């Protein structure tokens, strides 16, 4: 079951749970606004697992994890609208942008961070700029492309430095 399938089938189970779980209330209130953006989206994390399985995994303090599919670069107005969703919800809201090559936090994607953590099927990758991920930046045709960068490196831990040096020269 994909997150998008869960979003399309927000069941009658979600409405009664909204009073107990702020993350479910947030999901129900955000669904029409997300649909209006015309993006494929869906719940993930605990709320997604709960919707898919019915198992009692949610707590009143649970956050809401959402996945936004973005096969092409997101328009700046869409990014602004997604960021605005985070204001006014009664729980923590984590939005991941899935480019098809990996996922990155919306806050990193929108904020123009110098470095971002791209979560891929092969494990996490530290990238140089979130907004270029999967759209002609460091990824092309699904293959990692070399990136030239000059970064200040300070070896404060000799063990970590040795392990890193070994990994780099493998």
Image (cartoon, rainbow, N blue to C red):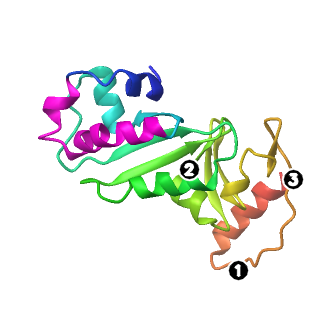
Does the segment drawn in magenta span residue 89?
Answer: no
Residue that label 2 marks = 78
Using the image, determine if residue 108 lies above or below residue 63: below
- Residue 71 % position (x, y): 67, 36
Specify the quadrant of the image occupied by residue 70.
top right
What span is in magenta?
13-36
Callout in the foreground (1, 2): 2
Specify the quadrant of the image occupied by residue 155.
bottom right
Specify the quadrant of the image occupied by residue 142.
top right
Callout in the foreground (3, 1): 3
Name the residue: 83% across, 68% down: 149
User: Answer yes or no: do the residues labelled 2 and 3 have beta carbons within 8 Å?
Assistant: no
Q: Residues within 10 Å of mark 1 (few under 14, many from 20)?
A: few
The mark that comes first in sequence, 2 or 3, is: 2
Callout in the foreground (2, 3): 2
In the picture, measured across the screen, residue 160 lies left or right of residue 139, that is: left
Residue that label 3 marks = 146
Query: Closer to the camera, 165 or 150?
Result: 150
The mark that comes first in sequence, 3 or 1, is: 3
Query: Closer to the camera, 28 or 115?
Result: 28
Q: Tell me the number on the disc at residue 154.
A: 1
Which image quarter holds the N terminus? Answer: top left
């Amino acid at each position: 079951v994909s997150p998008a399938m869960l979003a399309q089938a927000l069941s009658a189970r979600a409405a009664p749970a909204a009073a107990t779980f702020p993350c479910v209330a947030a999901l129900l209130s955000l669904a029409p606004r997300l649909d209006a953006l015309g993006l494929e989206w869906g719940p993930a994390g605990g709320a997604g697992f709960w919707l898919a399985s019915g198992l009692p995994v949610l707590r009143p303090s649970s956050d809401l994890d959402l996945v936004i599919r973005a096969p092409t670069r997101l328009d700046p107005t869409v990014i602004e609208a997604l960021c605005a969703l985070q204001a006014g919800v009664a729980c923590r809201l984590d939005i991941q942008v899935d480019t098809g090559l990996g996922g990155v936090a919306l806050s990193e994607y929108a904020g123009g961070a110098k470095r971002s953590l791209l979560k891929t099927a092969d494990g996490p990758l530290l990238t140089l700029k979130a907004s270029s991920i999967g759209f002609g930046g460091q990824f092309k045709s699904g293959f990692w492309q070399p990136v030239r960068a000059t970064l200040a490196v300070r070896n404060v831990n000799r063990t970590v430095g040795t392990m890193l040096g070994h990994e780099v020269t493998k």
